Amino acid sequence: LFSATEHCRFSVILIDTAPYFHGRTLLSKLHHFGIPTTYVHLRAAHFALAKGVHSLFIAADAVYANGSALADAGAAALAMTAKYHCVPVLVCCESYKFHAATHLDSLGWNEVITNETILIPKRTLFLRFDVTPATYITAFITEHGLIPPTSSAVLVRELELGQHAAGGIVGGNK
């Protein structure tokens, strides 16, 4: 990351959301490397993306065969906003997180975060994940390269074939 800042100039707009605010950790790391960073809440994403953003990167916890991605709550709204502004949405996800299952929403499978978990004084209920539809995703960034959402089922099939050929180990790694 540090060498990238020496060879090309770029800045980061970090969009974060409650309840965990994981972006604050990333913000301190980017600041440590001297990368110009703007930190905004998800509610200001529309205005942040309207400032000429070139790419949106989202981390996914799972990718399904229909090309949708399970990510932290707010990722779907962020991807929709990016599509509105014609900003490509790149989802970062390791290939072992690709699944043959298909989920159309995040309500059937989710984690509920209670106020006791995150020490918020009011009675508040948070959903941990949401599902970003494939129509809002430009590509997945994996260790196999860029994969379009329409090819996620192909990657799942190839990984399953590799798993069977390697005796139950995906890609032959031990």
Image (tube, helix red, strand yellow):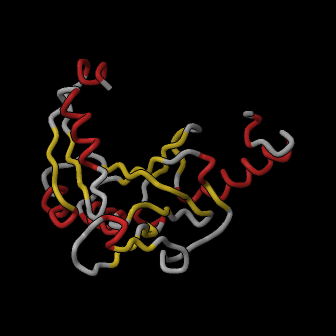
Vertically, is 32 above or below 136? Answer: above
Place of residue 38 in the rendered image (x, y in percent of width and height, measured from the top left): 14, 45
Q: Quadrant of the N terminus?
A: top left
Vertically, is 64 above or below 156? Answer: below
Place of residue 114 in the rendered image (x, y in percent of width and height, measured from the top left): 37, 74
Q: Quadrant of the C terminus?
A: top right
Place of residue 2 in the rendered image (x, y in percent of width and height, measured from the top left): 29, 22
Front position in the image: 56 or 28:
28
Apparent side of residue 165 relative to residue 86 in the rendered image (left or right): right
Apparent side of residue 4 relative to residue 98 in the rendered image (left or right): left
Q: Residue at x 54, y 58 (%)?
A: 62
| Residue 83 appears in the figure | no
Q: How many numbered circles are shown?
A: 0
Apparent side of residue 150 relative to residue 83 in the rendered image (left or right): right
Apparent side of residue 34 relative to residue 59 in the rendered image (left or right): left
| Residue 129 appears in the figure | yes
Q: Residue at x 26, y 61 (%)?
A: 17
Q: Residue at x 60, y 46 (%)?
A: 95
Residue 124 figure quarter? bottom left
Place of residue 13 in the rendered image (x, y in percent of width and height, measured from the top left): 20, 47
Q: Residue at x 42, y 51 (%)?
A: 59
Residue 32 figure quarter? top left
